[in-house]
Amino acid sequence: MEEGSIAEVTERLKYWGTHYDRSLARLEWDSMDSRREVVARLKAALEPATPFIEIELPVGGESQQVVSGLLDQLQTVKNAVVSITGIEWAFPQKGSLLSTLVALNFQRESLASLPVRQIWWIPSHL
């Protein structure tokens, strides 16, 4: 399997998703189509044994509200793999990337302590 291919990334995430109780994975992507294909394959490989949930961060929300809403959503989920997308457009129109990253960083321990495996999809241009 070619390193970085859709099949290889899917297999790595499948292993991670079935061998760890809670953790965070940060994956960079260049192609939205490739990211979607990995998510579709991973969901098919994990379910029904491991729930797979997709969360898209809201567009243009206020940083604290986006992070608070995400925490609320993640607290309702247990023993699942959660795919989180949309960080590239979840920033407020009048805010900045920095304010959102600060809000996320401030809650990193809370995010990491939840009993879910979180996949954070980050566009490589960020």
Image: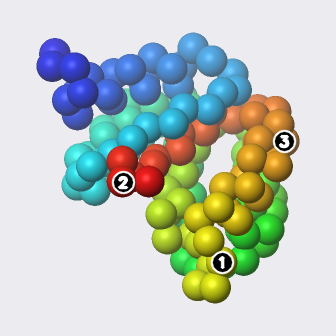
Mark closer to the chain start, 2 or 1: 1
Residue 18 visible from this viewpoint: yes
Mark closer to the chain start, 1 or 3: 1
Q: Are marks 2 and 3 in contact (CB under 8 Å)?
A: no
Residue 95 tag number: 1
Residue lying at 39% horizontally and 41% vertically, measured from the top left: 28
Q: Are marks 2 and 1 in contact (CB under 8 Å)?
A: no
Across and down, in percent, residue 11 comes to 33, 22
Label 2 Cα neighbours within 10 Å, binned few <14 / some 14-19 / many ≥20: few
Q: CA distance from mark 2 to mark 1?
A: 19 Å
* Quadrant hosting residue 72: bottom right
Mark closer to the chain start, 2 or 3: 3
Kind of residue sitting beneath label 1: Gly
| Residue that numbered label 3 is attached to | 110
Residue lying at 82% horizontally and 37% vertically, measured from the top left: 109
Q: In the displayed image of the protein, which residue is found farthest to the left?
A: 2
Q: CA distance from mark 1 to mark 3?
A: 23 Å
Across and down, in percent, residue 108 comes to 77, 41
Q: State the SS at label 2.
A: loop
Query: Is 47 drawn above or below residue 121 in the view shown?
Result: above
Query: Is 99 drawn above or below residue 17 in the view shown?
Result: below
Kind of residue sitting beneath label 3: Ser
Residue lying at 74% horizontally and 55% vertically, measured from the top left: 102
Kind of residue sitting beneath label 2: His
- Quadrant containing the N terminus is top left
| Residue that numbered label 2 is attached to | 125
